[in-house]
Image (spheres, grey):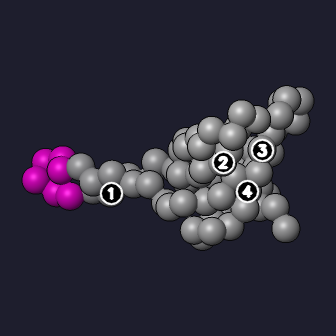
């Protein structure tokens, strides 16, 4: 993948962490794109933080976290 190639996920899509060697990697549902606005030198700037996902752990407890798009892959 090229450095300037962007990856976009939409709410409701199913994703998972793409790193190899991790135990118990669940499928997660994309909830939303997370960004924050900051005012710097009188100008408003929006910073992208990541993709908020939700999933159920092995005990059935709902979990939520924000991941970088580079750490996620789309599950078909």
Residue at image point 44% right, 54% down: 34
Mark 2 lies on residue: 55
> Foreground: 1 or 54?
54
Q: Dot 1 surroundings within 10 Å: few (below 14), some, or many (20 or more)? A: few
Q: Tell us which disc is closer to us: 3 or 1.
A: 3
Mark 3 lies on residue: 26
**Whether residue 2 is visible:** no
- Mark carried by residue 46: 1
The CA span between labels 4 and 1 is 25 Å
The CA span between labels 3 and 1 is 30 Å
The CA span between labels 3 and 4 is 9 Å
The CA span between labels 3 and 2 is 7 Å
Residue closest to the far right:
21
The mark that comes first in sequence, 4 or 2, is 4
Mark 4 lies on residue: 15
Quadrant (top left/top right/bottom left/bottom right) for the C terminus: bottom right
Magenta segment = 39-44
């Amino acid at each position: 993948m090229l450095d300037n190639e962007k990856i976009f996920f939409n709410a409701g899509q199913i994703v998972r962490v793409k790193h190899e060697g991790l135990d118990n990697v669940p499928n997660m549902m994309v909830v939303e794109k997370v960004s924050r606005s900051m005012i710097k030198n009188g100008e408003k700037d929006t910073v992208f933080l990541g993709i908020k996902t939700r999933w159920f752990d092995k005990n059935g407890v709902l979990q939520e976290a924000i991941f970088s798009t580079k750490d996620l892959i789309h599950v078909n």
